[in-house]
Image: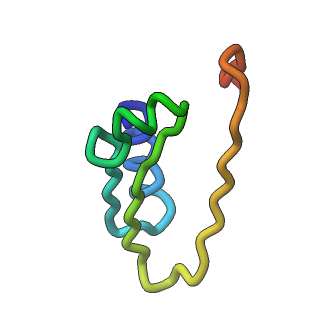
């Protein structure tokens, strides 16, 4: 969640999200899930009244992927 928090704060500041909460820790990702290579997170979003729809794409990449672009 260390990299996600700054991104979500930026979205909050610029795109009409009133608040958010990201839970990505041992309460959501148990040792059993880690053993099965699964990360489980909960993202709560409080939109502004103007927002009617959220579209979020999750893209799984290989471990060597570069996100510089």
Q: Nearer the viewer, residue 43 or 52?
A: 43
- Quadrant that contains the C terminus: top right
The residue at 47%/54% (across/down) is 11
- Camera-side residue of 16 and 57: 57
Please indicate whether residue 38 sits to the left or right of residue 20 in the image.
right
Q: Is 48 positioned to the left or the right of 59 in the image?
A: left
| Outermost residue, left side | 27
The image shows residue 42 at horizontal and vertical percentages of 40, 56
- Give x and y (percent) for residue 17: 42, 67
Give the colour scheme shown.
rainbow
Rendered location of residue 24, percent (x, y): 35, 43
At x 34%, y 61%, the residue is 20
Q: Quadrant of residue 68?
A: top right
Quarter of the image for residue 29 reads: top left
What residue do we see at 34% from left, 48% from top? 28
Quarter that holds the N terminus: top left
Left-right relation of 54 to 2: right
| Closer-to-camera residue (28/21) | 28
**Left or right: 52 in relation to 45:** right
Question: Seen from this angle, which residue lies furthest top?
Answer: 64
Q: Residue at x 47, y 28 (%)?
A: 35
State the count of labels: 0
Image position of 24 with respect to 14: above or below: above
In the rendered view, would you say 55 is above or below 53?
Answer: above
Q: Is residue 35 above or below residue 27?
A: above
């Amino acid at each position: 969640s260390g990299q996600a928090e700054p991104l979500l704060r930026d979205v909050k500041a610029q795109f009409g999200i009133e608040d958010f909460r990201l839970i990505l820790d041992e309460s959501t990702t148990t040792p059993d899930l880690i053993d099965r290579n699964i990360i489980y997170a909960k993202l709560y979003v409080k939109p502004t009244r103007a927002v009617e729809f959220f579209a979020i794409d999750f893209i799984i990449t290989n471990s060597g992927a570069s996100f510089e672009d």
